[in-house]
Amino acid sequence: MIVVMKPGCEESDVRHVVELVQQMGLKEHVIVGTDRTVVAAIGDKRSVDKGAIETAPMVDRIVPILAPYKVASKEIQQDPSSVLIAPGAVIGGARIGVIAGPCSVEDEGLLLEIAHAVKAEGAIGLRGGAFKPRTNPYSFQGMGETGLKYLAKAREATGLAVVTEIMSIDQVDMVSEYADVLQIGTRNMHNFNLLVAAGRTNKPILLKRGWSATLDEFLLAAEYIMNEGNKNVVLCERGIRTHEEYVRNTLPLAIIPAVKRESHLPIIIDPSQGTGHAYMVPSMSLASIAAGADGLIIEVHQDPEHAMTDGAQSITPEVFAKLMQDTRRVAEAVGRTA
Ligand code: PEP
Ligand code: MN
C-alpha cells in the first residue's frame, strides 16, 4: 500500500509513518516526489492496521498498489527514475545514454582501441563480457578476472563506465571490484537468488529481459533487486524468441511505451542481441530512440569477422560513429539529446 502524506509534512511525520510501517513487519520505501512524499509499505498485508496509519499526523490517505510489482511500479513514483552509472554518466532523463563495446573482452589492446573510439563518439559506458553465458560448453567462455582487469584499465584510460555481466552469485564480489554496472543477462533474469544478491550490492544493475519473459515477469525480476534496497535498476530489452528466422531474436519496441506506462525505471535497448545482424543495428537503434528508449547498448568490434563472440551482430567503429550522429538527430526530433 501507499501512504500519501499531506503537502507540507515534516520529516518527523514521515519518520513516524515509517516506524508504524516497520512495527507492522512491512518494509518501507520513502519516495519524495515533486509535490508529495509517499511511503510505500511492502509486505504481508494481513499484519496491517490501516487505521493506525490513517490517523497518524499529516497522513492524507492510503491507496493500495494494484500492480504485482510494487517498488518498480509507476503507482509509487510518477517521476521517471534516472540511474547514475558513473560520475557524470546517467541513464534516464533528457540525454540518451549509449553503452558500447565488444560482446566479449578478448584482448587488452583491442578493448582499449574500441573504448577510445566509442568514447570519442559520445558513449558513456563500455560494455564487454568477461564471463560469457554460452549455449555450447565448448565455445569461448570469456577471460574471467583477466578480462575484468582490462575493462578497469579501459575505464582508467577513457572515463567510461564499465558494464559487464555476472552469471552467478559467487562472481558478484569479484565483478563488483572492477565494474561500475553489473549486467544480469537474459538467461539469468529468472535466477531469483542472483537478483537478490545483485540487490544487496550498491552497484547499478542492468537487467535484461528473459527471452521468453512477459513484461510482468520482467518487472517482477526488477522488483526482486529493488526489494533488497537497490533502486538503481536499468531495464534492457534484448529481443525475445519467436518463430522468425530472419532475426536471431525479435525486438519488440512496443515494450518501451508499455514500460513507461507501468514503471518509473529507465529502459534501454540492445539492438545487437535484439536482431543478430549488424546491418539491422543502426535502424533499430534509431527506432528505439524515436519510441522513447532512454539509451542503447551496442556491440562494436573493429574486426567483426574475427570477433570471438557475436561478430555477425557487431558494428564497426565507423558505423558506430555514423549511428551516433544519426542518434543525435533523432533524439533532438523527440525532444532529447544524445
Ligand atoms: C551480451 O550482452 O553479450 C549477452 C550475452 O546478452 P543477453 O544476455 O541479452 O544474451
Ligand atoms: Mn553478445
Image (cartoon, grey):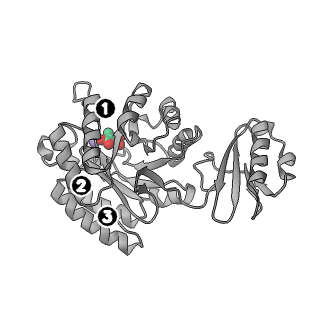
**Amino acid carrying mark 3 in the image:** Leu
> Mark 2 or 1, which is nearer the eye?
2
Of residues 67 and 48, the one drawn nearer to the viewer in this rendering: 48
Q: In this view, does 177 lie to the left or right of 17?
A: left
Instruction: Name the residue: 38% across, 31% down.
Output: 167
Q: Residue 254 carries which label?
A: none
Instruction: Name the residue: 61% across, 57% down.
Output: 77
Q: How many labels does the image show?
A: 3
* Dot 3 and dot 2 residues touching (CB under 8 Å): no
Image quarter where ligand 1 lies: top left
**Where is 291 relative to 233, above or below?**
below
Under circle 3, the secondary element is helix
Residue at which label 3 appears: 286
Q: Residues within 10 Å of mark 2 (few under 14, many from 20)?
A: many
> Mark 1 or 3, which is nearer the eye?
1
Of residues 240 and 181, the one drawn nearer to the viewer in this rendering: 181
As measured in the structure, the alpha-carbon distance from the residue carrying label 2 to the one carrying label 1 is: 22 Å
Residue at which label 2 appears: 118
Instruction: Name the residue: 42% across, 25% down.
Output: 170
Residue 245 makes an appearance in the image: yes
**Amino acid carrying mark 1 in the image:** Phe
As measured in the structure, the alpha-carbon distance from the residue carrying label 3 to the one carrying label 2 is: 17 Å
Instruction: Name the residue: 53% across, 34% down.
Output: 200
* Mark found first going from the N terminus, 2 or 1: 2
Q: Residues within 10 Å of mark 1 (few under 14, many from 20)?
A: many
Q: Quadrant of residue 175?
A: top left
**Amino acid carrying mark 2 in the image:** Val
Under circle 2, the secondary element is helix
* Mark found first going from the N terminus, 1 or 3: 1
> Mark 3 or 2, which is nearer the eye?
2
* Dot 1 and dot 3 residues touching (CB under 8 Å): no
Residue at which label 1 appears: 131
